[in-house]
Each structure stands twice: as C-alpha cells, then as structure tokens.
C-alpha cells in the first residue's frame, strides 16, 4: 500500500517539475530527471517484489 502512495506522489511531483510550467521553466530538466529516476527505481523495486 505504501508503494502505491509513494508512486502516486512521485508522479505528481514529476508532473510539477516539467519545465513547460511557468514556475519551473528556468530549472531545465534537472528536477524532472531526478524524479523520473526515482520513479523508475521505485517501479523496479515494486515489480521485483511481486515476481
């Protein structure tokens, strides 16, 4: 259950860090790259847990 909540929170943070939004346009791809990497790691951990 905790993994699902963490996954949803990471997806929302990833959408907020996309550089097309006005508040994050000057950040570049750095924040979304970090969150995307965390999201991939979490997905791998969740998938390996259920295999």
Image: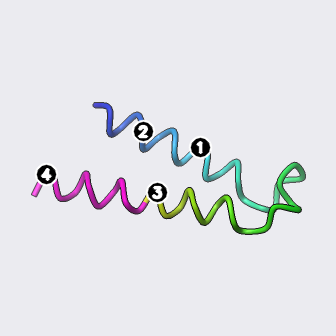
CA gap, disc 3 to disc 2?
A: 10 Å
Cα separation, mark 1 vs mark 4, equals 24 Å
Image disc number at residue 38: 3
Residues packed near mark 1 inside 10 Å, few (<14), some (14 to 19) or many (20 plus): few
The residue to which callout 1 is attached is: 12
Mark toward the viewer: 2 or 1? 2
| Front of the two marks 1 and 3 | 3
Q: Residue at x 51, y 46 (%)?
A: 10
Q: Compute the Cα span from label 1 to label 3.
A: 13 Å
Colour style of the rendered protein structure: rainbow
Label located before the other in sequence (1 or 3): 1
Q: Secondary structure at mark 2?
A: helix
**Can you say whether 20 is above or below 13 in the image?**
below
Residue 19, horizontal then vertical, whole percent: 78, 62
In reply to whether residue 48 is colored magenta, the answer given is: yes
Q: Using the numbered discs, state the Cα–Cα distance from disc 2 to disc 1 in whole angstroms.
A: 10 Å
| Residue 40 quadrant | bottom left
Crowd around label 2: few <14 · some 14–19 · many ≥20 (10 Å): few
* N-term-proximal mark, 2 vs 1: 2
Q: Is residue 33 left or right of residue 45?
A: right
The CA distance from mark 4 to mark 3 is 19 Å
Which type of secondary structure does the marked residue at label 3 adopt?
helix
- Residue in the picture at 61% in, 52% down: 14
Bounds of the magenta segment: 40-51
Q: Does 41 appear in magenta?
A: yes
Image x and y of residue 46, in percent? 25, 51
Task: Give coordinates of residue 26: x percent, y percent.
Answer: 88, 62
Q: Earlier in the sequence, mark 3 or mark 2?
A: 2
Q: In the picture provided, is 46 more to the left or to the right than 22?
A: left
The residue where tag 4 is placed is 50
The residue tagged 2 is 6
Callout 1 secondary element: helix
């Amino acid at each position: 259950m905790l993994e699902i909540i963490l996954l949803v929170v990471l997806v929302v943070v990833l959408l907020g860090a996309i550089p097309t939004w006005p508040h994050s346009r000057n950040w570049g791809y750095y924040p979304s790259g970090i969150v995307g990497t965390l999201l991939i790691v979490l997905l791998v951990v969740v998938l390996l847990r259920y295999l």
